[in-house]
């Protein structure tokens, strides 16, 4: 039997703002259709996921707002940095997600971009928007955990 190798994920970029602005209900993995110079630019770290989201058009899913900087040595082969990138998923998954987004008021947000082997993948989150008071509660909980950790660290040094 041929064993499937466990491929390590090499994370390139994360969308931390998405976790601040949304409750992430579910996560999905999708491929992304890119050109050669875009992949080279991604390897160099020239990508930004901030303010990006996913949209549907004619039964296909696109990532809108992912900024991939032009590759330095790409000359005429460079693409526009903010062009819509096609996400590659099974049709039934796309239809399921499209139905959830239309009916229940969810949104799809790219959470991270990473290499899985030699392929670039996008982790897409099915998200529900946070209200202002939800953001305040999350900030207060994070601050409380920091304070507890700080006090526990100080206590361990005293004894």
Image (cartoon, rainbow, N blue to C red):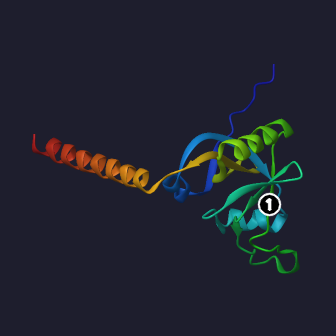
Seen in the picture, residue 17 relative to 46 is either above or below; the reply is above
State the residue at coordinates (58%, 57%): 15
Direction bottom: furthest residue: 75
Q: Considering the image in quadrants, where does the N terminus appear? A: top right
Q: Position of residue 23 (x, y in %)?
A: 53, 46
Indicate left or right for 116 with 90 as reference. left
- Outermost residue toward the top? 1
**Nearest the eye: 25 or 6:** 25
Q: In this view of the protein, can residue 123 be seen by the observer?
A: yes
In the depicted view, which residue is nearer to us: 78 or 96? 96
Q: Residue furthest front?
A: 103
Q: How many marks?
A: 1
Q: Residues within 10 Å of mark 1 (few under 14, many from 20)?
A: some
Residue that appears at 67% across and 67% down = 44
* Residue 112, image x, y percentages: 62, 53
In-front residue for pair 15/9: 15
Residue 117 shows in the view: no
Q: Residue at x 50, y 51 (%)?
A: 130
Q: Quadrant of the C terminus?
A: top left
Q: Is residue 60 toward the left or the right of residue 105 in the image?
A: right
Residue 11 in the image: state x and y as whole percent: 61, 52
Q: Secondary structure at mark 1?
A: strand
Residue that mark 1 sits on: 85
Residue 27 sits in which quadrant?
Answer: top right
The answer to whether residue 45 is above or below residue 127 is below
As drawn, 79 above or below 151: below
Left or right of 58? Residue 2 is left
């Amino acid at each position: 039997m041929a064993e499937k190798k466990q491929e390590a994920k090499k994370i390139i970029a994360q969308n931390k703002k998405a976790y601040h602005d949304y409750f992430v209900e579910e996560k999905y993995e999708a491929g992304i259709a890119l050109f050669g110079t875009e992949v080279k630019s991604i390897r160099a770290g020239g990508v930004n996921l901030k303010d990006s989201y996913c949209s549907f058009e004619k039964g296909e899913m696109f990532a809108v707002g992912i900024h991939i900087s032009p590759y330095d040595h790409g000359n005429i082969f460079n693409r526009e940095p903010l062009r819509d990138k096609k996400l590659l998923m099974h049709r039934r998954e796309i239809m399921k997600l499209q139905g959830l987004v239309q009916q229940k008021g969810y949104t799809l947000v790219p959470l991270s971009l990473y290499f899985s082997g030699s392929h670039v993948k996008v982790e897409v989150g099915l998200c529900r928007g946070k209200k202002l008071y939800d953001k305040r509660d999350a900030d207060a909980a994070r601050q409380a955990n920091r304070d507890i950790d700080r006090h526990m660290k100080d206590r361990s040094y005293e004894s």
